[in-house]
Image (tube, rainbow, N blue to C red):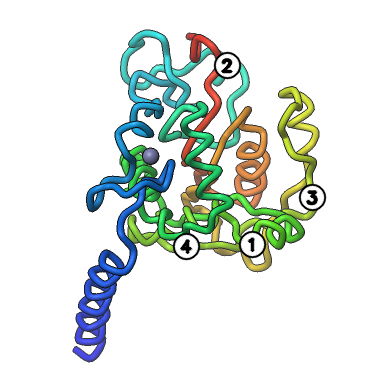
């Protein structure tokens, strides 16, 4: 009784706060910062520059297929080299427009953008989240966390967990080694760059055993980072690991079967 009353008041207070936030912070485009109508995430121009990923795509990697190969079709690459994660999904292709949006999110401290992005992740993860147990971010190394002031993947993961009603586990993984930025590295160099960079956080083994973990990252390039993180979780006994990210690099021509 007591608990339900507290929950009722908490929910009411939150609704009040979100109304207050609408008044205090007029909605701004996530891409360019221009004013937009309430609840629109992007202005028309930024919207036009975004390439949202839609089906058909590889059921494992989420990379779009150039043609419809039927439900559950898996790309040749994922069959030949099955990743440690079961499924990965991205909201949009990594394009100039996507890069602008992510850059703005990363460096301009517009942390109120996280709930809007979390709605995108909830949409692309609609077939994954109902069976998931927890949401965890791809961790940043402490040194980089300090220079960037916040881990945007953690903010995304926290907002997604709230949106999906799942447990948020920010310390499931730790980055034990600062890695070179992946920009400009080949796929093979990226894999070597992140190999051994992650380990299980303290107490995480008991949390992940037989559980379905959703990993959240802002951008997936070759998938080497997601793969390294998923491997650690699977080795720790996770039943399944899925990956949701805002944007991913799509190879020219998409995935092949
Ligand atoms: Zn805009």
Q: Viewed as shown, does residue 245 lie left or right of 81?
A: left
Q: Viewed as shown, does residue 45 lie left or right of 93?
A: left
Residue at the spot of label 1: 149
Mark closer to the observer (2, 4): 4
- Position of residue 102 measured from the top left corner of the image (x, y, whole percent): 52, 42
Element carrying mark 2: helix
**Mark 3 vs mark 1: which is more N-terminal?**
1
Which residue appears at 68% of the width and 40% of the height? 228
Q: Residues within 10 Å of mark 2 (few under 14, many from 20)?
A: some
Residue 149 in which image quadrant: bottom right
Marks 2 and 4, how far apart at CA: 31 Å
- Position of residue 61 measured from the top left corner of the image (x, y, whole percent): 50, 27
Nearer to me, 83 or 226: 226
Q: Which mark is residue 77?
A: 2
Element carrying mark 3: loop
Marks 1 and 2, how far apart at CA: 37 Å
Q: Residues within 10 Å of mark 3 (few under 14, many from 20)?
A: some
Residues at circles 1 and 2 in contact by the CB criterion of under 8 Å: no
Q: Viewed as shown, does residue 250 lie left or right of 231?
A: left
The answer to whether residue 86 is above or below residue 113 is above
Mark closer to the observer (1, 2): 1
Residue at the spot of label 3: 178
Marks 3 and 4, how far apart at CA: 24 Å
Question: Dividing the image into 4 quarters, which one contains the N terminus?
Answer: bottom left
**Mark 2 vs mark 4: which is more N-terminal?**
2
**Mark 3 vs mark 4: which is more N-terminal?**
4
Marks 3 and 1, how far apart at CA: 16 Å
The answer to whether residue 41 is above or below residue 248 is below
Which residue appears at 20% of the width and 86% of the height? 5
Residue at the spot of label 4: 168
- Position of residue 28 measured from the top left corner of the image (x, y, whole percent): 35, 51
């Amino acid at each position: 009784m007591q608990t339900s009353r507290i929950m009722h008041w908490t929910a009411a207070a939150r609704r009040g706060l979100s109304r207050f936030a609408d008044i205090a912070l007029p909605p701004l485009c996530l891409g360019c910062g221009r004013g937009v109508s309430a609840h629109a995430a992007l202005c028309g121009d930024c919207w036009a520059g975004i390439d949202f990923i839609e089906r058909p795509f590889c059921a494992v990697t989420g990379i779009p297929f150039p043609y419809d190969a039927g439900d559950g079709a898996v790309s040749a690459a994922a069959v030949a080299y099955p990743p440690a994660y079961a499924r990965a999904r991205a909201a949009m292709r990594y394009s100039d427009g996507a890069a602008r949006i992510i850059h703005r999110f990363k460096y301009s401290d517009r942390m109120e953008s996280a709930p809007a992005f979390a709605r995108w992740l909830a949409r692309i993860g609609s077939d994954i989240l109902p069976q998931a147990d927890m949401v965890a971010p791809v961790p940043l190394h402490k040194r980089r966390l300090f220079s960037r002031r916040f881990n945007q993947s953690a903010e995304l993961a926290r907002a997604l967990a709230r949106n999906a009603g799942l447990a948020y586990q920010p310390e499931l993984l730790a980055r034990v080694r600062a890695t070179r930025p992946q920009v400009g590295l080949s796929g093979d160099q990226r894999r070597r760059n992140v190999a051994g960079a992650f380990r299980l956080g303290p107490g995480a083994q008991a949390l992940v055993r037989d559980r379905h973990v959703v990993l959240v990252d802002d951008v997936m390039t070759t998938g080497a980072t997601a793969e390294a993180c998923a491997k650690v979780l699977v080795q720790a006994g996770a039943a399944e690991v899925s990956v949701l990210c805002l944007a991913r690099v799509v190879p020219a021509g998409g995935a092949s079967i």
